[in-house]
Image (tube, rainbow, N blue to C red):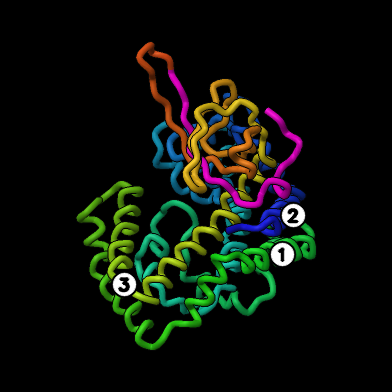
Amino acid sequence: MTTASTWAATRQLAEAWSRSPIVQDYTAQLPANNPSDRGIPEMLRNIDSSTGLVSHEPLIPNKWELMASELPFVDLNVRGGRQFLEDARPIGFAAERNTAWIRSRLPRFPLIPTPQLGRHTHRTSNELGQGLGWRREAMTGGLQLLSAPPGVSELLRIDKRSHDTAIVALADALADTPEWAKFAELSARLTPDDRRALSEARKTLTPLLCEAAVTAFEPDRMLRREQYRKDTVASVVDQLAGTPAEFALAFDEIDELIDLVSLSVLGQLIAYGGPRVIVDPQNLEREGQNLTFSSPTTSIGRAALLKFDDPMVADCVLVTGFSFHSDETGDVHDSYSAVILPNSRDSLLDESVV
């Protein structure tokens, strides 16, 4: 569970990034910030309508560039379009270095024996997928030996001391979460027999995740290929027992938490600013840390940081999905899903009210 320190450090890092002229030029063109229906904003809007990446993954624009040429409704030849994507590459490189460096502080890195980091899994495949994978270059580059991610301030053209202070504070705050502590405790508890069980799980996955096996399931569609890898890994992890099973599940928890903080929430703060207060949430339902709601008078978008004016939810939330449906009269209604960000209320909230 995240702490107030986690979100304070996230905001501090976002503020450091926001001083970058590269980031400022970049965010000025994002569709949520620029209503123009022409040029670069419209190009990005079309990329987002097909993929959702501009909304959900604003810190990984390198991925948009790779996918855009395959999208039928995206015109990369709009004035300045290709140059914009090229100029945005340092943002993606910087985000990857930061996240990879935080990961490198995990116990046993770079030789974390969990099945999820075996060859060709959904976390290590070289194919495009959701989020940011664990690239082999990042795992073998000695990041765990460095006091801060290398070259990020140079990529973004920002003050090195301010950036490094902020990213170290964020890494320290994540290391102070229960998820990190649980993973560290289980990592220390692994016996030789436990490590053999984890190694055998990786061996089991090898033929199941080879190119031929994945292509036999789905030859073309990226999301289905990724889901096959994810489901296959999950089925093998489910066969583990005892400490190896606990270790693999704990890895998932801390891996997801690092990405949530260092990519998803940080990305929203940098690209779109702090949470907006929604004063009219409707049909608000909560199950654990997950929410569903509708917002009949406020346009929210595919991803956003929000704060509800409702006692049911004291913390800020991250919108993770949306859908539309028609009722019996033909009226169209929206429905959003979101995840609660524990202990974020005072650390993330700004003065923006919708």
The reply to whether the magenta stretch includes residue 350 is yes
Are discs 1 and 2 less than 8 Å apart at CB? Answer: yes
At 47% from the left and 26% from the top, the residue drawn is: 334
Pointer 1 or 2: first along the chain: 2
Question: What residue would you read off at disc 1?
Answer: 169
Question: What residue would you read off at disc 2?
Answer: 12
Q: Nearer the viewer, residue 312 or 142?
A: 312
Of badges 3 and 2, the one in the foreground is 3
The reply to whether the magenta stretch includes residue 93 is no
- Within-10-Å neighbours for mark 3: few <14, some 14–19, many 20+: some
At 39% from the left and 57% from the top, the residue drawn is: 127
Q: Which residues are magenta?
A: 332-354
Pointer 3 or 2: first along the chain: 2
- Within-10-Å neighbours for mark 2: few <14, some 14–19, many 20+: many
* Above or below for 109 versus 95: below
Report if residue 105 is visible in the image: yes
Question: What residue would you read off at disc 3?
Answer: 240
Give residue 128's mark: none
Q: Amino acid at mark 2?
A: Gln
In this image, 44 relative to 174: left or right? left
What is the x, y in percent for residue 241? 32, 73
Q: Amino acid at mark 3?
A: Leu
Badge 1 marks a residue whose secondary structure is: helix
- Within-10-Å neighbours for mark 1: few <14, some 14–19, many 20+: some
